[in-house]
Amino acid sequence: MIGDTSPNEAAMKINLIEYFEATVEAYPEKIALIDENTSLTFQELRSRSKVYAHAILKNKDVVKKPIAVYLPKSVEAVSAFLAILYSGNSYAPLDIGSPVKRIQQLLEVLKPEYIITDTDCIEKLESLNLGIELINIDRIESNPAPDIKSYGNCIDTDPAYIMHTSGSTGVPKGVVISHKSIIDFIHWVIETFKVASEEKISNQAPFVFDNSTLDIYLMVFTGATLHLTPEHFFIFPKKLIDYLEANQISFIFWVPSVLVQVANMGVLRKDSLPSLKKVLFCGEIMPTKHLNIWRSNLSRSTLYANLYGPTEITDVCTYHIIERDYPDQEPLPIGKACRNTEIILLNNENKLCSIDEHGELCIRGSCLSPGYWKNHDKTTEVFVQNPHNTAYLDLIYRTGDIAYQNSNGNIMFVGRKDLQIKHLGYRIELGEIEHAVLSSFDNLSACVVYDEVRKEIILFYQSLNTIEVPDFRIKLSKVIPKYMVPTKYIQLNELPKNASGKIDRNYLNKYNNI
């Protein structure tokens, strides 16, 4: 069992709004949030959130219920999240870009007390005839902020938010995350990465993706300024770099796909981004070759960290701070467990894995979600009793990810159980093929899928130049066995992304079968 249980010296409060109130008192006139159109000080953010909270509470007594937020990523969305927490309830972000059918499926299970939206978005919701009361923030009167005390009834095990993730049956699963889990997580982030009020954070993650938890609550806890970086900048790497430099961004926590795209476009130069001191990434495998492009162009004092964690455990459960040079071909560790978290690697017999033995990565600790909203069967399927403790209730989360611990004590991510294929009699991890492709070719993004019917390993790639099939095969045969070399190669102008900003494998599987 692998863990880091050093004591947390920070004084704990009971719920998230107590932390926000303390930050507002410490930094009332400091800028808290900036989006493309608006900026708010901490005092202004509190006032706006309390006005929205009053609109939630004025018509009926709403206590510890889910309230959906159907807004674009903006200062208004963050204000709505805080308003819901002020009202003593939990928020559920909805993706305004999702198809109507998915929104309807999600709301039928969630059954929120309200949906908070605006004039631009309300028409789509009204067309669904949901029978759920809508709160249009554009019609809320901007009266002086009322005194809201409802949050005082929340204890740390109450839900703070419900984040939806894809379900195997096609119905989204609502992951419930408590105040306690977020508090524990953010204290660890602050201590580990020395985050203080001077930090300027650039948010990339959509609010329907759990990576946004780190960005939002570092602002809430520390008084750091959070820049909600406009989404269109992530399509144009040069403009993105200009934005980071103009705003003197010091901290980013992005998905690797974005870092890879920036590296591929050649927009980084020696001593780029002098203000950027902390580069964290999570959500996908970070190709070492592309990390090295960042490291070679930014200040040597910049900190880089590879983080890992599923939505079900409050964003992150392991981390690895890059403290040495890694050759392009060497995969990065996901490291060791975060404080107050334990990682258990179980083999097929539910026994603890030995060094270098592959097994399912399982997690225990305060980080765990209490389960899926109104989905007891799925909850009990993956949140299970620790097989090595029969004395009392001791739940672990079975991630479905395969990993191993190396002789240095680092955890190495191998891939998803469902991305492990059997081809020509061999067990193959598709992630290993992707790493080989990305480390062997310049200025390229890639995703590998498997066609079960045709028994083909298919490489989708995005590159400014077409690469001939023989070039792929010759180079890849030098780094992976021939049975792992893709049999089909498809070049796309752009690899599709899902709502979280990750490469959309499901879409590529469907694309291949058209």
Image (spheres, grey):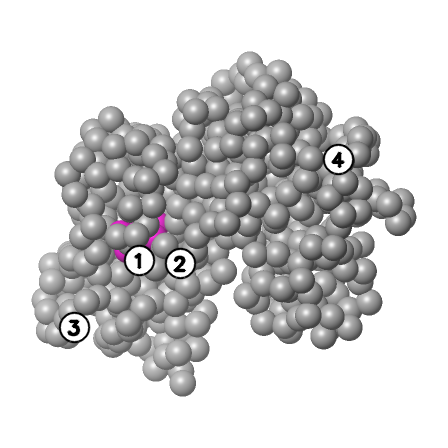
For the point 79% across and 34% down, the residue is 146
When asked about the image quadrant of residue 411, the answer is: top left
Counting residues from the start of the chain, the first of labels 2 and 4 encountered is 4
Foreground tag (1 vs 3): 1
Estimate the x, y position of residue 149 in percent, counting from the top left: 81, 30
When asked about the image quadrant of residue 148, the answer is: top right
Residue 145 disc label? 4
Counting residues from the start of the chain, the first of labels 4 and 1 encountered is 4
Q: Which residue is mark 3?
A: 466
Residue 236 disc label? 1
Where disc 4 sits, the SS reads loop
Where disc 1 sits, the SS reads loop
Estimate the x, y position of residue 113 in percent, counting from the top left: 80, 54
Tell whether 116 sits left or right of 365: right
Q: CA distance from mark 4 to mark 1?
A: 40 Å
Magenta segment main secondary structure: helix
Quadrant where the C terminus sits is bottom left
The type of residue carrying mark 4 is Ala
Counting residues from the start of the chain, the first of labels 4 and 3 encountered is 4
Q: Is residue 161 above or below residue 470?
A: above
Q: CA distance from mark 2 to mark 4?
A: 34 Å
- Label 1 CA crowd tier, 10 Å (few <14, some 14–19, many 20+): some
| Magenta residues (range) | 256-262
Estimate the x, y position of residue 254 in percent, counting from the top left: 39, 46
Q: Is residue 309 above or below residue 478?
A: above
- Label 4 CA crowd tier, 10 Å (few <14, some 14–19, many 20+): some
Q: Taking the image as drawn, is residue 447 in sight?
A: yes
Counting residues from the start of the chain, the first of labels 1 and 3 encountered is 1
Tell whether 350 sits left or right of 20: left
